[in-house]
Amino acid sequence: MQENIRNFSIIAHIDHGKSTLADRILEITGAVSKREAKEQLLDNMDIERERGITIKLNQVQLQYTYKETEYYLHLIDTPGHVDFSYEVSRSLAACEGAILVVDAAQGVEAQTLANLYLAMEHDLTIIPVINKIDLPNADIEKVKKELVNELGFKEEEIILTSAKNGTGIKELVEAVIDRIPAPKGDKNKPLQGLIFDSFFDSYRGVVVTTRIMNGEVKVGDTIRFMETGATYEVTELCVMTPKEKQLQKLSCGEVGQVVASIKAIQDVRVGDTFTLDKNPASLPLPGYQPMKSMVYCGIYPIESTKFDDLRDALDKLKLNDASLVYEPETSKALGFGFRCGFLGLLHMDIIEERIEREFHIDLIATSPSVIYQVTLTDGSEIEIDAPTKLPDRQLIKEIREPYVKTSIFTPSEYIGPIMELCQNKRGEYVGMDYLDTTRVNIHYDLPLSEIIYDFFDRLKSSTKGYASFDYEIAGYRKSDLVRLDILLNGELVDAFSTIVHKDFAYSRGRAIVEKLRSIIPRQLFEVPIQASIGAKIIARENIKALRKDVLAKCYGGDITRKRKLLEKQKEGKKRMKQVGSVEIPQEAFLSVLTMDDK
Amino acid sequence: MKSMYIHIPFCNSICSYCDFCKMYYEEDLVLSYLDALKKEIDRFYQKETLKTLYIGGGTPSHLSKACLTKLFKIIDTFPLDINYEFTFECNIEDLSLSLLTFLYHHRVNRLSIGVESFLEKNLTFLNRHHTKEEVFKKIVLAKQVGFSNISIDLMYALLNETLQELEKDIDFALSLDVSHISLYSLIIEEHTKIQIEQIEPISEELDLKMYQFIEKKLEQSGYIHYEVSNYAKKGFESKHNLVYWNNDVYYGFGLGASGYIGDVRYTNTRSLNHYLKGNYRYQEEKLSKEIKMSNEMILGLRKLEGIALDDFQKKYEKRVEEVYDIKDLLDSKSLEIEKGYLRIPKDKIYVSNAILVRFV
């Protein structure tokens, strides 16, 4: 029954205890016993556990009897990082309410606000929760005040929990039923299913995770994806409890998974609507956005024979990550690979790590780039998403780069360091708003290319993690940009090329050659590393030749040990990419991304 | 014809850098050990004539008269080739007229003496207990007894060692006028005292300079550089060690010893208990043709002379170039071919691992 359904998610700043809270809710509703409750059950990918962040959306159906009525609670998990705000927005669109978790010791933080705003945009009912009240340094009163004074909640709305020892969980679950409205929508209208996630199962093809907004879908129905127009016959419907439970139909208000032998992964896009082929809805649900990649980089397999495996891996990842885009490209240094577009740097990191871990392909990633607009001297316009594609300087009349308008929220004591950071990143000061006596919102216009390096990390470290920032693309501006090339042993290594502002080129070039010198191991011969702009060398370092790499003593029994030693040495070589005559370790390519140019 | 190595794993003092199989000397234990050794030899040795025989350790020279007699009771029966080489490893402080005479009369015709250094500072660091004066005295004594083939071991790249200190050591060594000198750059091996004490190696640059200095100085003084760490006067190259580097077969007997017989490379147990009970073998590996060829390259390229290409082809019915793609190594002068020999050029020997990885 539709009125007995509650769809909700949990939103929180990173590490405020979202996943543990979810585990406790699963326990209290009997979905899992304590014994089977692996720590943080919903985060089922290794990387998620290690980074303590949730990348993939997950959903689970829970049953709970309250006031003698059986309720079906659908808990929809959301990713917690700004790079994934579209995915968050799609999963929030599948909910009527959200639990806002705030750490009792840390209080309201940047992501708390950002997520709260997102939830409010979707008109969700919010249940504020102060978690970790068992901590010795918990300051419940202060956090309560923040929730009331800064975020406008009423004190009596706030629920106190300790996910660690289970305090307040029952009250919370019952508040979900009492306060969050049952899903709206009309069972008798034509089917509209919101796709908020999908993943690939080698036996069943693409599995679509959906919230039915109107109508219903049954096994055997032919469905049509409205954005792509593809049609498929539904072979299976199920819901996770968290064990998989097969269903015959999914009705308006329900959340579940659709299996339809979908092999063409590009047919399924997060945010798209599916409907019945026979009796289609006239319009898709609002809010679908084709993804816009902000950051591009080249991804190459270390072993060139793994190119096809890499394509396969990207195809599969694309399934549950609609925001990933890629097309084949070739590098002189690295061979065949893909130019990939990402939402941001974290997104890029995660994709690379998943390819290495889940698909066992060792990768080299080139330095990330934004999209530049170039006007050539003949008046034509081109767009560049890779430094190597930048034409010769003589052919360029003008280069424009994307700028973003940033809003940086910070306690006022960090204004100084933040302004210094922004100045160093070619920022243009726009203004500052005092939110109250202690908090400010600083506005800067910054080149996106500066943000994609390490802006976020630096912002965090210079404000002890207190500042948060948000940005929107603010159009293109003319910039004095040049391509900085790196030559190894006299040969240009295209994978190291970057586009930088002319004023920064010298220091960046210096920093890159120094870093490479420290990372690239000694070779049999001396290797010069040079940074150049066009034909002009602006920095140079030498990697000295290997001096000693020999086993002084090798007699009878030593041959077995000697072999082992050489085998180990050979294994290390495998992780290196041979570029011309020089062997470059994988980290060298990554190191260019994390330059410390003060 | 075969070769044989016999390991005597007993020492009266443990050197700080040593990772060989060794333990403190205890007379009763040594006697039992020699019983077990005899049984091992009886079980495996087919009484072939030996062209080389090597008794190493440990410290074989530290054996008591009784033990020595017992050991040579086994050895005296071995048939030796007319051009045999029979080496016995010695410590300076063990060398006495009686020991030297004993060895001389029991067919030992080559001494390998652990000198390591002449400088007190180095000897202390290595935990060796002789003096420079003793070295001179004992070498003269050995020559007087009749040994004309004497090899000494020296070590360099020691703790904070300077080039000047090394030069002194080399000068002393040359003045001994021995037929063979092994010069080892210190390797900090695991489970040794110096590794546990986290001794820092000297810089790669200085290490190479020392190596180059040694090579130049010894060649000027009439020694031939014939293996990474070995120098000999003409005709005094170690026949036994060349068996190893030529990838030829040999028996290895005793605790922790290794051998290569037929297609099998084996290593003996390092547990004295197992060994005394007759459980000699710890590991045996039957080698494929690929591994044999690979060993041939890894070992053979330690020799300055290199690998005789014809011999390789005869042995494996394939040419080196068919088995390994070495064109780029030849192009970059990391390998060279001259008069039928494939070798690592002199200036690349000290980075040979970087080249040898291509053959594993």
Image (cartoon, coloured by chain):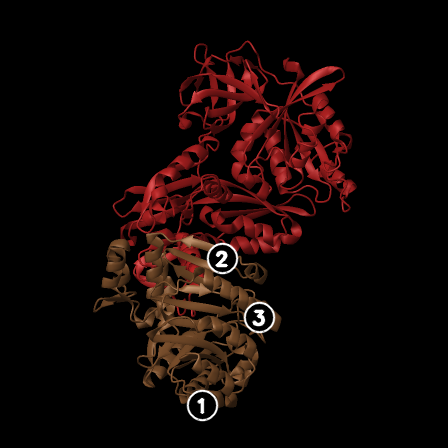
The quarter of the rendered structure image containing the C terminus of chain B is bottom left
- Looking at the picture, tell me which residue is in the foreground, A516 or A393: A516
Q: Nearer the viewer, mark 2 or mark 1?
A: 2
Which residue, given by chain and number where applicable, does mark 2 sit on?
B281
Q: Which chain: red?
A: A
Q: Amino acid at mark 3?
A: Val
Disc 3 chain ID? B
Q: Residue furthest left?
A: B339
Neighbours of disc 3 within 10 Å: few (<14), some (14-19), many (20+): some
Q: Are marks 3 and 2 on the same chain?
A: yes
Answer whether residue A510 is visible to the viewer in this image.
no
Residue B213, percent from left and from top = 38, 80
Q: Which chain: brown?
A: B
Which residue, given by chain and number where applicable, does mark 3 sit on?
B30
Disc 1 chain ID? B
The quarter of the rendered structure image containing the N terminus of chain B is bottom left
Q: Disc 3 vs disc 1: Cβ atoms closer than 8 Å?
A: no
Q: CA distance from mark 3 to mark 1?
A: 30 Å
Q: Quadrant of residue B12?
A: bottom right
Q: Secondary structure at mark 3?
A: helix
Residue A555, percent from left and from top = 42, 67
Disc 2 chain ID? B
The first of marks 3 and 1 along the sequence is: 3
Answer above or below: position of A380 versus B309.
above
Question: Residue B140's mark?
Answer: 1
Q: Nearer the viewer, mark 3 or mark 1?
A: 3
Q: Secondary structure at mark 2?
A: strand
Q: Amino acid at mark 2?
A: Arg
Q: Nearer the viewer, mark 3 or mark 2?
A: 3
